[in-house]
Image (cartoon, grey):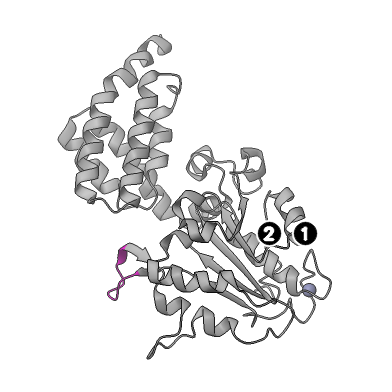
Amino acid sequence: MSRFAKTDMQILGHQKILELLPKLRAQTLLFTGPEGVGRRTVARWFAAGLNCEQGFPPCGRCVSCRQEPHPDYLEIAPQGETKTGKKARAPQIRLEQIAPREGSEEPSLLEWMATYPRFRAKVAVIDGAHHLGEPAANALLKLLEEPPAFARLVLIAPGRELVLPTLVSRSLEVGFAPLSEALLHPLSTDPEVLAYAQGAPGKVYWALTNPAEFAKLTGRAQGVLEALQAGPTQTLEALKLLSEVDDALPYLGHLLGQGRVESPAYKEVLEALSRAQDALSAYVGEDLVQTWLALRLYKAFPALCAGDAAKAG
Ligand SMILES: [Zn+2]
């Protein structure tokens, strides 16, 4: 085990952001970008540097850098699980995570922020700012409007358009782009893993540390491809199986596009996948979305494959 867990972390890419962050005065930052791209890791690095005796980059050895957990660092994330441990359909950051509430066991963000830091800055990360319920967002807004001088807040979301405009207008956006494949090569050169990661090192780590789950994903995505040749009902069944694995649609898009990215039908397929993804994020009924998607894919599939034989021959 590393003694420097917080600052010892390896950050891949994002060099310009690492240079920029120490110069920013804004007390509230909004980190946007795809899941797994490194927003959380950079937020932890930023917090470590704000409190390190040496400043940036954090040294990993001083009293502050060795705190684990760090008393001046707080991460708030949506409660994604129901009481039975099943994944919640609509993860949400609840009011009691932000503002004090009677009977709540954990101190809220506002209570935590009300005391002075042990070092220089108190850094709170709201991981999943797009999952803030309205009461929670309103309570947070009060803090963003008048933060104590020692407070820094980092909101994390896939894109600014998903976050309430009142919160966006009080933050400075820092956008994280997917990394190039070359930057990911030290982690893995497996083309399947890289196709799944789409430039996000966090997804490479996930695939490498969860080989069984990853094999399930690739196997079930392959199953959809086979089902598309059989019929719409089979396609729907295969899609249902695939969607039991997290985050599977972009990977299916990659498989369907192999050797066909220039086909006009592929554009249709990508559009259908992205609309399905949006609908699922908006908590439209899963059955409805899957049925719709199965039909769209099944209809587009012959045109998608039409060029295959010509290319092979
Ligand atoms: Zn240090």
Q: Secondary structure at mark 2?
A: loop
Which corner quadrant holds the N terminus? bottom right
Residue furthest out toward the left = 233
Residue density around tag 1, few if under 14, some if 14–19, many if 20 or more, within 10 Å: few
Decide which of 151, 3 is in the foreground and name it. 151
Q: Say whether residue 152 is left or right of residue 200.
A: right
x%, y% of residue 134? 39, 66
x%, y% of residue 129? 48, 62
Which corner quadrant holds the C terminus? top left
Q: Say whether residue 131 is left or right of residue 201.
A: left
Q: Say whether residue 313 is left or right of residue 148.
A: left
Identify which residue is drawn at 40% across, 54% down.
Answer: 213
Residue 23: mark in rendering: 1
Residue 125: mark in rendering: none
Residue type at mark 2: give it.
Gln
Separation of marks 1 and 2 at Cα, in angstroms: 21 Å
Q: Is residue 259 above or below residue 207?
A: above
Residue furthest out toward the bottom = 103
Question: Which numbered disc flags the more N-terminal residue, 1 or 2?
Answer: 2
Residue type at mark 1: give it.
Lys
The stretch in magenta equals: 81-89
Identify which residue is drawn at 68% across, 49% down.
Answer: 14
Q: Is residue 40 above or below residue 230?
A: below
Q: Which residue is mark 2?
A: 10
x%, y% of residue 131? 41, 62
> Quick check: can you spot residue 220?
no
Q: Which quarter is ligand 1 in?
A: bottom right
